[in-house]
Amino acid sequence: MELILFGIIKEWVTETDIDLQENNIQTVKDLKLYLLNKYPQLNSLSSYMIAVNQTYAEDNMVLSTDAEVAILPPVSGG
């Protein structure tokens, strides 16, 4: 599965390809837990969004090995 990283997350997360089967990742929630465990600095964010194949994803969405997953930090504008 390919990760596309944005903002501060791009500085913290060092991998862009994750083997779902090897890491026992089936859902978006599993991915979040994996990332939080491996990159604890993500805990400092108030929130972040995950999009799968260019659509915002809920925690229970099942991931596939050919998925394109984007991780987006919180944004503000004005």
Image (cartoon, rainbow, N blue to C red):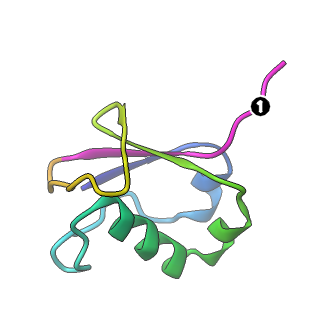
Can you give x and y, in whole percent of width and height, for residue 4 in the image? 42, 45
Q: Where, quadrant-wise, is the N terminus in this rendering?
A: bottom left
The location of residue 55, given as percent across then percent down, is 34, 32
Q: Percent position (x, y) of residue 25?
A: 25, 71
Quarter of the picture containing the C terminus is top right
Which of 39 and 55 lies nearest the eye of the viewer?
55
Q: Which residue of the protein is positioned furthest toward the right in this rendering?
A: 78
Crowd rating for badge 1 (residues with CA inside 10 Å; few <14, some 14–19, many 20+): few
Instruction: Note whether 8 is above or below 24 in the view shown.
Output: above
Q: Residue at x 77, y 31 (%)?
A: 76
The quadrant in which residue 23 appears is bottom left
Q: Within the magenta stretch, is there residue 65?
A: no
Residue drawn at x 67%, y 42% as measured from the top left: 74
Image quarter for residue 51?
A: top left
Residue nearest the observer in this picture, 10 or 20: 20
Residue at the extreme top: 78
Q: Label 1 is placed on what type of residue?
A: Ser
Residue at screen point 15% across, 56% down:
65
> Magenta residues?
67-78
Q: Is residue 57 left or right of residue 25?
A: right
Place of residue 59 in the rendered image (x, y in percent of width and height, measured from the top left): 37, 56
Q: How many marks?
A: 1
54 is higher (above) or lower (below) than 3: above
Element class at badge 1:
loop
Q: Dot 1 corresponds to which residue?
A: 76
Q: Residue at x 74, y 66 (%)?
A: 44
Is residue 72 part of the magenta span, yes or no? Answer: yes
Report whether 22 appears left or right of 4: left
